[in-house]
Each structure stands twice: as C-alpha cells, then as structure tokens.
C-alpha cells in the first residue's frame, strides 16, 4: 500500500484505547491502520463485485453486510 493514509491515526488510536489499550505506541497505531485500510479496501472491492453481479450501479448497505459476513 502507498504511504498515503486513508484513516487518521488519531481515530485508530481511539479504537485501540476503546478496546482496552491504555498505552499505545505509534508503530502499533500505524500497523493497525495499515491492516484496517487493507481490509476495508478488500471489503469494498468485494461489495462492488457483488453489486456489479446483481446489475446494480451502486453498493448499498446490504452489500457490505453480506460481504462482511463472509
């Protein structure tokens, strides 16, 4: 993945803290951000393929829900 961030690191830091992490290193935040971005891109690609297969021009909430359950 490129060096361009999609998710703000502060938001990823809040996710880790919400999950119980008290002290969070910056490399840990960056690593989780990369993982979440990669997963999000793959999820969006699969939802787009599902919409295309169903002859829809846009991905809807249900498409992401179906793909997220796989």
Image (spheres, helix red, strand yellow):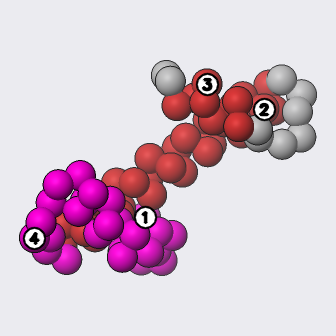
Q: Nearer the viewer, residue 11 or 27?
A: 11
Q: Are marks 3 and 2 in contact (CB under 8 Å)?
A: no
Q: Earlier in the sequence, mark 1 or mark 2?
A: 1
C-alpha separation, residue under disc 3 versus residue under disc 2: 11 Å
- Mark 3 or 2, nearer chain start: 2
The residue lying at 23 percent from left, 62 percent from top is 17
Q: Picture coordinates of residue 20 (x, y %)?
A: 17, 54
Query: Which of pointers 4 and 3 lies earlier in the amino acid sequence?
Result: 4
Residue drawn at point x = 18 percent, y = 66 percent = 28
Q: Which residue is label 3 attached to?
A: 66
Secondary structure at badge 1 equals: loop
Q: Secondary structure at mark 4?
A: loop
Secondary structure under badge 2?
Answer: helix
Q: Residue at x 88, y 33 (%)?
A: 56
Upstream in the sequence, badge 3 or badge 1? 1
Residue 2 in sight: no
Is 39 displayed left or right of 45 in the figure?
left
Which of labels 4 and 3 is toward the front? 4
Mark 4 → mark 1, Cα distance in angstroms: 27 Å
Q: Label 2: few (<14), some or many (≥20) within 10 Å?
A: some
Query: Which of disc 1 and disc 4 is earlier in sequence?
Result: 1
Give the residue at mark 1: 1
Circle 3 sits in a helix, a strand or a loop, which is it?
Answer: helix
Q: Residue under circle 4? A: 23
> Is 54 contained in the magenta span?
no
Magenta range: 1-26
For the residues labelled 3 and 1, the Cα–Cα distance comes to: 25 Å
**Mark carried by residue 51:** 2
Q: Are marks 4 and 1 in contact (CB under 8 Å)?
A: no
For this view, does 4 lie left or right of residue 19? right
Q: Nearer the observer, disc 2 or disc 4?
A: 4
């Amino acid at each position: 993945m490129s060096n361009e961030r999609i998710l703000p690191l502060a938001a990823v830091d809040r996710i880790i803290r919400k999950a119980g992490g008290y002290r969070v290193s910056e490399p840990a935040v960056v690593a989780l951000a990369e993982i979440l971005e990669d997963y999000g891109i793959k999820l969006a690609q699969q939802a787009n393929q599902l919409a295309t297969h169903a002859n829809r021009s846009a991905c809807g909430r249900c498409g992401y829900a179906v793909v997220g359950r796989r």
